[in-house]
Each structure stands twice: as structure tokens, then as C-alpha cells.
Image (cartoon, rainbow, N blue to C red):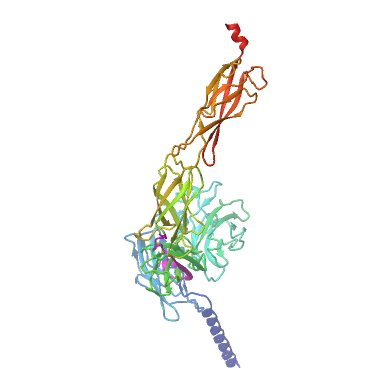
Amino acid sequence: METMKIVRLGVIFFLCKVFLCEYVEGSSCTRGFETELLVFKVHRDHLHQGKRLGRVIFNTCDGRTRTLFQSSDKRFDVNTDGTVTLKRQVTLHEGHKVFSVHAWDSSGKKHTVSVRVECVHHHEDHHMDTVMNISSPQMESHSDDLVLMFPKSSTGLKRAKREAKGGWVIPPFNVMENSRGPFPMKLVQIKSDYSSKYQMAYSLTGEGADLYPKGIFIIERLSGNLYVTRTLDREVKASYRLIAHATGVGVNIAEKPMEIIVKVIDQNDNRPVFSKEIYNGRVPEAAEIGHEFMTVNATDLDDPDTDNSVIRYSIDRQEPPFPQPNMFGINTVTGGIHVIKTGLDREQWHRYNLDITATDLKGKDLSTTCSAIIFVTDSNDNAPQFEQTSHTVSVPENKVGAVVAKLTVTDEDKEGSPAWSTKYQIISGDKGGFFNVSTGPSRLEGIITTVKPLDFEKNKQYILSVIVENDEPFVGALATSTATVTVNVEDVNEPPEFNPKERVIYKPEDSPIDSELVSYTATDPDIGKPQKITYKIGNDPEGWLSVNQDTGLIKVKRLMDRESPHVKDGKYTAIILAVDDGNPPATSTGTLIIELEDSSNSFCLR
């Protein structure tokens, strides 16, 4: 019966072990050391035989707790649990020593971690040495004999610093994220000097203890052993601020609170993530080598101060692979995509698809992909051409906004593109700025209009030179098309002009009938074809005046009276008309103001 029991137990143990191994193998466990570099800090240059430096941690992923390690330096021994000790005395002549530790997983693959033993000199007492030992950048969290003492102000501490509230700040120590335990895992023992005489009670407050997220760190009340209870995730929280307390049991003594900063050391457990799954870009077919036209971007949640989040980009595939399979390159650091080969041809290959990969750890580890769709745009390699290069037109003078000419063009570039749409410029023949040229609604037409009135008497003809270009600059040296527009100004019958338009004269009110008052005449601006001017009375409220139709001589027709209701402030106003014999006749007006002198005043003066 006993034999059967033993056999059954053996079978059960074997099945459990097989199940455990299969479970671990199927998990996301990564075999190997937890870090690429371990730093063990010591306080002396001379290290004695048997000194324990710390432990290296190797994940086997098969449930084994013992691993065969090998040191590259025979003076250092590594036990199967990862404990590193000295086989014989070692002197750190340069203040440090670096060697490698190797291990092999169940598949026979070799893994290596670098170990650096570094001397940190301290002149303080034992308490200060213990405190500063916490500042090791890669403190081994599984260490069973690491003790953190409460500092004493009387010991001449120089490297610890006080908080504003009087507590002590200890240099932070590090814990690797994603540790597999087992939990709770001891980090350090907190200890008070008073414990040599009195029983002390230890407690912990702060982030991860009694503050959110609660319960991550716990401390044994009487031993002071500080534990982490579960796996830490740097991307959730990168550091924790804990306050350690120590008070006497039944004795009125207490240590000053001690701040402990736990920094979570990053592992490369996040893949880069592109900001888009598909990027769209455009590149001109005539783009030169080196022309950067779009950028892809990926981010990584790992520690930005480590290589875990340093991303490198690469192009894995180009479709279609014409005219060459590597028409585009990518800046491995910025993600900028640029042209590295000439020969893009929109008419043959108007679109490319690129598969782009972003890999972290400077391009050596976790990766992700995205697509870049590149549209090849038309380049302006065809200059627009005037359909007719010579025009002669006539435009009436004095008209603003008159359409002078419409100049049509053709362009062989892609319709609707900036390389096809046109713009125009008058390059000569318009010194006075009388004309404007604009693009018509069809985008292939230049419309010339007048923006100032033309004057036949000053300039009878303008010869304009007009060029046409595209909204997009030409690619290379293309000849610009030019049109010549001869504008003949048409003479328009303009009305005569009185000079001045308002004439003032002084006459006594008793001026005799048929006496001459003034000759008020106008001139004809149409000097090209002299015309006869006839004068008329336009408005004479009292009928006092007459005008010679040929000479413009104005005489007294009836006696004038200063007391007339049409005399205002002694002034009488009449309107004189000047009419030319053009077809049709043109008329202008002149204003005659007569200041009447009182005849009674004149008599008194005599």
C-alpha cells in the first residue's frame, strides 16, 4: 500500500510539474535577466573573500528557482540563487570593476548581464554608509540583509538633506517594473538605533501605503521589514513617496520621519504607436532628390529618458516598385519621408503605398507598422500659350471699367491644378496705370479693363505687352507666352468748359439798359475737331440779362434792382449755357454772380 501511495504521489507531482511548465511556457514571460546592467556599490577599495555583493535575477519561465550561472571573472562566484560573492580578495584599483555573468535557459540559449562593482567613499559613520547605500542605481530588491537606518543629525550627515518640515530625505532607490515576485517581496529593513535598547514599532505612510494606490507597500510592525506586495508598472506610476516612522513600544521615544523615494525602473514593455494607421501625402512629380514632403510619427509609453522609448523608422515595402523599388527614403529619427530617386511620373504611376515600421530601443526591439499613401501631383512642365498673340481694339475715352480685350490661352497640364490655372501681368505700355488684367472664370482667360478714364486729347493709343503664367511656378526654364494689345482711344464729344465755372462781377443796380456787363465764354476740350459754341441764358429769375449767342457777351436787358427778392445779400445769380454743335450736342453751365451796388449810396458818395 505504501508503495502504491508513493507511485500515485509521484505521478501527481509529475503531472503538476508538466502542467505548470506548459502554463508558464504559454504565458508572456520573457526568459533572461531583468536588466542589462547591475551596479553593486561598495564603500572600500579592498574587498575581502566571502563578501556578498547582491543578487542577479534570471527569469527561467519554467518555475525553477535555481539557475546555473557563470562569471567571466573567476574572482567572483555566482550561486544558483543568483547571489554574487567574492571567491578571494579583490582590490578596485580604478575604483570599479566590470565583469559579465552568463546563464542558459531551458532551450539552451545563452543570456548575459553586465555587473559593475563601484566604490563610493564615505567618511561618515556606519549609519551614513547604510543610508547612502540606498542610492545605488540598481539596488537589488531581493536582498535579505539590506538595512536602512534612521539618520541622526549628530553624526554630521552631509549627503542627506532636510525637508522644510524637518524630515529626512534619503536618495531614491530603484525597483524594476513587471517583477514576477514572489510577493510580498522584501525591499529593505527599516531600523532605528533605539532598537538596541528598546522595542520599536515601525509604520509606513504615503503613496502606495495609506494613500492611493493603497497597499502596494507594507511594513512589518516590529521587524521593520519593508515589502512590495505586487508587480509595479512604471507607465501607471513612475515613483512613490513613502514616509517611514519609528516609535518606542511603551517608551516615549520616536525617530524623525524618514522619506523614502521608490523609483520604478522602466522595462521595454510598450510597443511604439503611430498617431495614424494611414498617412496621406503628396509629392510633385518633378521633386528633387532630398525633397521631404510628409512625416509619420509614433510615440512610446516607456520611460522617455531611456532607450526603451527611442524610436527608429524604416520603409519595408514600396508598391508599385516602379520606376525603381526605392524611390523614397525616411529619416530614421524624425519620420520625415523624402525623395531619393528621380523619375516620378504622374501620368504612369500617380499613387504609391509604403509600409513603414517604427521600432523602439533605437530600432532593436518592439515594433509596429503603418501605411503611407503617396499621391504624385502634376508639376508645371508646360507653359500656357496665348491662342492669339496680337490684338487691336478701340475703347471710348472717359469710361472706367470698360472691357478692353479678352485673351484666351491653352495649357497642357492637368486641368484644375495650380499648374494649369493661369494669371496675367501687363509688363509694358501702361505707365499711367490705366489698365488692369485679371483671370476670367474659365481660369484660361485674361480680361483687360480700364481702371482710369482714358483721354483722347492726351493719348490716342496704348500698346500693351501682356504675359501669362501659372499659379504654380514653372519647372525648369520654360518660355513665357506674350501677347500684344494695341488700344486705340475713341474721341467722345465732351462739353465746353467755362473758365472759371463761377464768375463774380460788381455792377451798380442802376446800370443802363444795353450796357455791357461781362464777356463770359467757354472753350471746347475736343481739340481734335474744332466745334462752334453757342451761348444761352439758362436761368435769369428777373429777366435782367441778355447774352450774345456767338460771343458770350452779357448785357443789361432790364434795369436791375437791389431790392429784388432774388437778390440775396446784394448778390444776383444767373446761369449761362454753352452748347457745342457736336453729334449729339454737349452742354455745360457757368454761374454768373452779380454783386449789385446800391445807387443811393453811390449818389451820396458823389
Residue placed furthest toward the left: 93
Position of 480 with respect to 399 (left or right) is: left
Q: Name above or below for residue 41 compared with residue 460.
A: below
Q: Would you identify the image quadrant in which residue 562 lies?
A: top right
Up/down of 531 relative to 119, above or below: above
State yes or no: residue 574 in magenta. no
Magenta residue check for 373: yes
- How far across and how far down the image is residue 285, in percent? 40, 66
Q: Nearer the viewer, residue 547 or 194?
A: 547
Residue range of the region highlighted in magenta in the rendering? 360-387
Residue 486 position, x and y percent, is: 41, 50
For this view, does 276 lie left or right of residue 464? right
Q: Is residue 278 visible?
A: yes
Quarter of the picture containing the N terminus is bottom right
Q: Which residue shows up at 49% across the image and 57% down it?
A: 172
Foreground pick, 446 / 490: 490
Looking at the image, is 273 positioned above or below residue 572? below
